[in-house]
């Protein structure tokens, strides 16, 4: 189980949030997020670093940013997604530039030669991960619904997200939640479609549907904010230290992740 606590604030239409991520009760990551949604478009950035004792063994510092537009029918039209930093034991960078609703990988360092290539024919009308969240927030705020299917491309993997809802539901308690009571909950099913590691023993788990939920709370001055996210994540157990990186199998285990919000 992982949790993520956030402290959002707003300046001139921009939401800034600090997050703490927990795994099985341990504080493992800190994240900063800054985003702005307007009727015509969106932009934002995130930064993720290790925290607590895990920072002694894990080197990670990844910054991602996104730019995009909202179409008249409420869909997203990404323009740019850029993510780079230290991850999985190496300096990594991926940049997607979108044209005619199709992403083009303009930089991928280092090349992911151990993955199966994704056919170009699968890329039209896909969105990046941050644009997918922007779409969900925009749809819920403008229509009151979160029903739909999105194909997500992060530069190396292709995944499907099917979302439905919302329903009014209690926010689960158990960690350092700052919110209690009811919130709007959107449920989703995610599964990887392509970009698998070649000959991976975890392929079946990665391709199988994984359920999750997002709880949204309306916060004064901020609007709807995701205050908790839970989802199953199949693990391809990886050990990434300061001086070495190694992949090994998790015997098909699943981690239940929970993202918990905390507003000042």
Image: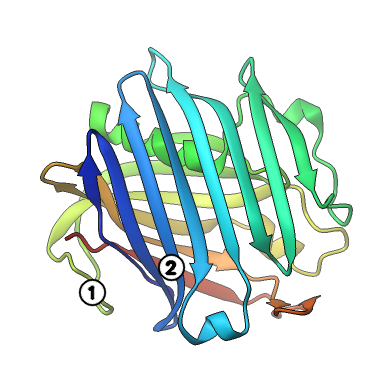
Where the N terminus falls, by quadrant?
bottom left
* Mark 1 and mark 2: Cα distance apart in space: 20 Å
- Note whether 13 is above or below 90 in the view shown: above
Q: At 70% across and 29% down in the image, what residue appears? A: 123
Mark 1 closeness class: few <14, some 14–19, many ≥20 residues within 10 Å: few
Q: How many marks?
A: 2
Q: Residue 114 at x, y = what percent?
A: 87, 57
Q: Residue 258 is drawn in which quadrant? A: bottom left
- Compared to residue 152, the image places residue 71 above or below, namely above
Q: For the residue labelled by badge 2, is the local secondary structure a helix, a strand or a loop?
A: strand
Determine which quarter of the picture holds residue 253. bottom right
Residue tagged 1:
173
- Can see residue 247? no
Which mark is first along the chain, 2 or 1? 2
Residue 37: image location, x then y, percent: 33, 31
Which residue is the site of mark 2?
A: 30
Q: Nearer the viewer, mark 1 or mark 2?
A: 2
* Residue at the (77%, 26%) spot, across then down: 121
Q: How is the structure coloured here?
A: rainbow
Which numbered dot is residue 81?
none
Which quarter shows the C terminus? bottom left
Q: Residue furthest front?
A: 11
């Amino acid at each position: 189980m992982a949790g993520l606590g956030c402290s959002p604030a707003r300046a001139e239409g921009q939401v800034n949030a600090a997050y703490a991520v927990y795994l099985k009760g341990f504080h493992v990551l800190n994240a900063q997020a800054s985003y702005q949604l307007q009727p015509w478009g969106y932009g934002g950035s995130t930064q993720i670093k290790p925290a607590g004792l895990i920072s002694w063994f894990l080197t990670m510092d990844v910054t991602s940013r996104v730019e995009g537009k909202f179409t008249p029918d409420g869909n997203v039209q990404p323009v740019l997604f850029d993510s780079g930093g230290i991850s999985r034991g190496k300096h990594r960078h991926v940049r997607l530039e979108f044209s005619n609703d199709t992403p083009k990988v303009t930089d991928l360092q280092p090349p992911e030669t151990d993955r199966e290539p994704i056919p170009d024919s699968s890329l039209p009308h896909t969105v990046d991960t941050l644009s997918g969240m922007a779409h969900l927030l925009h749809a819920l705020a403008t229509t009151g619904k979160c029903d739909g299917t999105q194909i997500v491309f992060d530069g190396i993997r292709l995944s499907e997200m099917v979302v439905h809802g919302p329903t009014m539901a209690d926010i689960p308690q158990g960690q350092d939640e700052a919110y209690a009571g009811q919130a709007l909950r959107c449920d989703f099913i995610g599964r990887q479609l392509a970009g698998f590691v070649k000959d991976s023993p975890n392929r079946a788990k990665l391709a199988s549907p994984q359920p999750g939920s997002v709880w949204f709370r309306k916060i004064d001055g901020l609007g709807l904010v995701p205050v908790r996210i839970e989802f199953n994540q199949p693990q391809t157990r990886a050990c990434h230290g300061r001086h070495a990186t190694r992949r090994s199998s998790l015997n098909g285990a699943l981690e239940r992740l929970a993202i918990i919000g905390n507003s000042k």
